[in-house]
Amino acid sequence: MQIRLFQSEDTEQIAQLFHDTVRKINIQNYSPEQIIAWAPEDIYFRNWSERPRRETTGLPLTSLKVCSHRFTYVAQQDDKIVGFGELEADGHIDCFYTHYQHQGQGIGSRIYQEIETKARELNLPCLFVEVSIAAQAFFISRGFTVIKQQQV
C-alpha cells in the first residue's frame, strides 16, 4: 500500500469511497435521513477535485492559514484508493475515510501517521476533528478527547 498526496485523477474514486463508506458503515449508527443528508445520491454534491490543495513547500504557517491549504493523503493499493484523509493548515482533520471493504486493516492508521507527520512539520500546536460514532474510538486511541457531542 502506498500513501501519497491527492491527484486530480483520484476524484472519482474518492467521491465513490466517501459515498459508499458513509452508506455502508455509518448506517449502523445514524438514521436513513441523516445518511442521505451526509451522503446524497449525487456523489458529486461537492466538488471533490477542488477540495484538496497540493502541498506548497517552504511557506510559513501564517501563509498556509491565509491560503487555506489542504493536504489530502490517499492510500492506494494497486490501482484502487482504499482510504483518504485531509489536513487543513489550522490543524483541522477534515474528511477521513477508509473504504468500507478495507476497515480494520491499518489503512486509517497509515493515513493518520502521514497527517500527524505533516502537522509536526508545520508546527501545529494541536489537531482537531469532527468524527462519526464509528470513528470516535479510532481518534480517542490516538490521544484525542471528546469536547462535545454534536447533532448536525
Image (tube, grey):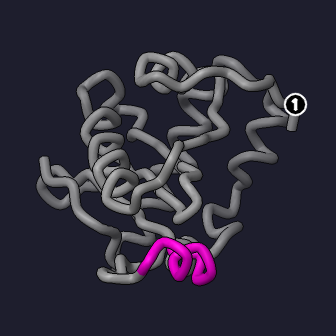
Query: Taking the image as drawn, is residue 94 in sight?
Result: no
Q: Is residue 128 left or right of residue 56?
A: right
Whether residue 64 appears in magenta in the rendering, the answer is yes
Q: Name the spot of residue 92 as percent of width and height, x first.
A: 58, 52
Disc 1 target residue: 151
Q: Nearer the viewer, residue 17 or 65?
A: 65
The residue shown at (31%, 22%) is: 104
Residue 24 visible to the viewer: yes
Query: Residue 6: image x %, image y %?
Result: 34, 69
- Tell me how many marks there are: 1
- The kind of residue tagged 1 is Gln
Does 34 appear above or below 61? above
Residue at image point 35% right, 27% down: 103
**As drawn, 48 above or below 133:** below
* Residue 77 appears left or right of 52: left
Residue 27 image offset from top left, x and y in percent: 66, 26
Highlighted range, magenta: 60-69
Image point (67%, 21%), residue name = 146
| Mark 1 burial class by Cα count in 10 Å: few <14, some 14-19, many 20+ | few
Q: Quadrant of residue 105?
A: top left
* Residue 43 image position (x, y, % from top left): 62, 62
Choose top left, top right, bottom left or bottom right for residue 30: top right
Q: Is the magenta stretch mostly helix, strand or loop?
A: helix
Question: Please, what secondary structure does the residue beneath circle 1 have?
Answer: loop
